[in-house]
Image (tube, rainbow, N blue to C red):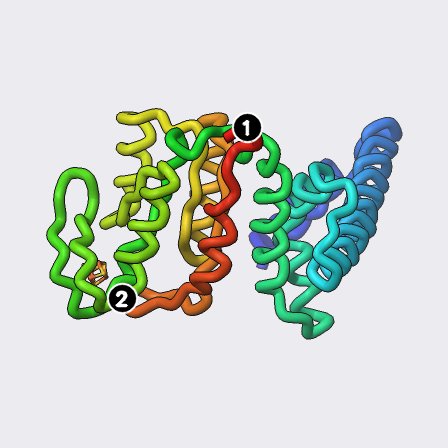
Amino acid sequence: MRRSVGNKFIGRRFFKTIVMFPEYINQLFYLVGEAVVLLALLILILSIIVSMLVLYSFKTGNFFAARYMLLGIVLLENVITTLFWITRVDDSIVDDVGVRLRNYINNKEFLNTPCAMRFIFMPQCVRSTECPAKLTPEGIKCVNCGRCNVGDAQKYAESLGYHFFIVPGSSFIKRIIKKYRPRAIVGVGCHMEIKEGLDLCHRHGIPARGVLLLKAGCVATTLDWEQFYEAIKEKEPHA
Ligand code: SF4
């Protein structure tokens, strides 16, 4: 009994020691609290603005203040996707617009690069499940057997001067970039692969274009081949 009274007494003293801060500390806490609330409010307002810009770009295909918008998407992605989720709007739109924005920003530099210095990275999952191609140190070597569209795409791309690679795994692209130092890149993949690939190219200072798969997955994925041909067919202006 005496012990519990003693504990209470010690507890009260301890509590008093904790809560009795000097006035300037209380002021500091108050200011920090205010700053946090203001920051949260600012993040929310900016996220709402960027979300509206994303929707506008998705609907019209136009970009307003592209670089700032991309910065906003990169920094506020989690809040923006949450806002989309709350308002029941498909949040894959954010990724889609993010890829289109990066393509748009890279466009001029990409087009100024001769086709002979552009590389294409095609994911191995778009091949036929009965693909007879063999794995080599330079990727999977298509023999244009006609079972899927990759063979024709490679033929067309190489006729323009592109270097065409079928990617067997994630570390392959880094290895090829290090080995050949391409001046521009077209990458095909799912949202995540394209995002990571475009970031990788940005870090290496390589203008890149991303082409999203229509149906992602590990095998038998699909691609809008027209969109792919559109992405690669523009040559440099003086060619
Ligand atoms: S066309 Fe090329 S990639 Fe497609 S299944 Fe044949 S060998 Fe494989």
Residue 148 falls in image quadrant: bottom left
Of residues 132 and 218, the one drawn nearer to the viewer in this rendering = 132
Q: Name the residue located 62 percent from the left edge and 62 percent from the top edge.
A: 93
Q: What element carries label 2?
A: loop
Location of residue 66 (image quadrant): top right
Does residue 18 appear to the left or right of 170 in the view shown?
right
Asked whether, in this view, residue 196 is left or right of residue 125, the answer is right
Q: Quadrant of the N terminus?
A: bottom right
Q: Look at the numbered disc 1 and give the secondary structure of its residue.
A: loop
Please state the quadrant of the image where ligand 1 appears: bottom left
Quickly name the residue at label 1: 238
Please give the name of the residue rendered at 13% of the width and 49% of the height, measured from the top-left corner: 135
- At which x and y percent is residue 83? 71, 63
Specify which label sits upstream in the sequence, 2 or 1: 2
**Vertical position of residue 172 compared to residue 140: above or below:** above
| In the image, the residue with mark 2 has its CB under 8 Å from the nearest atom of ligand 1 | yes
The residue lying at 29 percent from left, 61 percent from top is 125
Give the labeled residue for mark 2.
148
